[in-house]
Amino acid sequence: MDSHHNKQLVMQAYGLYSQGDIKGVLDLCTDQVCWTSADIAQVPFSGTYHGRYEVGEFFASLAGNMDTVHFTPRDFIAEGDKVVVTGTAHWHVKSTGADFGSDWVHVFTVRDDKITRFEQYTDTAAAQAAFRGAPAAQAGAPALHH
């Protein structure tokens, strides 16, 4: 598939996620999808997940541990089999009551009209501090711009 089509596929995945349709997101992934982010101490859903079942567990753990205050993709940049998305998010950690925000970058690899790999880059220190219970102002979270 061409980069424009890959970009449309990733945009579709974000649309499904925003509607809470995790099954729809998983249907856009290969059976062997690799979903990865930095392994962050105290953040139960951090690390690497293999296959649609495990990625579904990632989303369940994400929703079980945090509420989305806002999650906004901004830019979608496609080249070959890669789609890079920049955005910003603000989260509320259920167990500690702490909030944190961060800009993020997601890198998708798309092959044969399916997502085969997802990589997340974000402010890991802010997430870790929020899961420890530090208020957002002390967690080093950047100011969020809308």
Image (tube, rainbow, N blue to C red):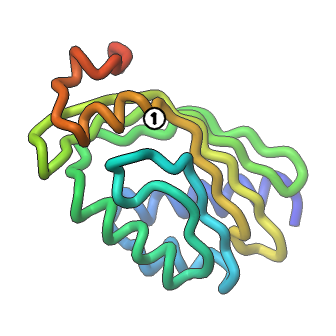
Residue at 23 percent of width and 52 percent of height: 66
Front one among 92 and 87: 92
Residue at 25 percent of width and 47 percent of height: 68
Q: Determine crowd level at label 1: few under 14, some 14-19, many 20+ residues with C-alpha closer than 10 A.
A: some
In percent of width and height, residue 141 lies at 34, 20
In percent of width and height, residue 20 lies at 32, 66
The secondary structure type at the circle numbered 1 is helix
Question: Which residue sits furthest front?
Answer: 41
Vertical arrangement, residue 116 with respect to residue 122, above or below: below
Quarter of the image with the N terminus is: bottom right
Residue at 56 percent of width and 51 percent of height: 37
Quarter of the image with the C terminus is: top left
In percent of width and height, residue 83 lies at 73, 49
Count up the numbered dots: 1
Residue at 22 percent of width and 64 percent of height: 64
Tell me: 102 left or right of 38: left
Vertical arrangement, residue 23 with respect to residue 68, above or below: below
Is residue 145 visible to the viewer in this orientation of the structure? no
Residue position for label 1: 124
In percent of width and height, residue 123 lies at 46, 30
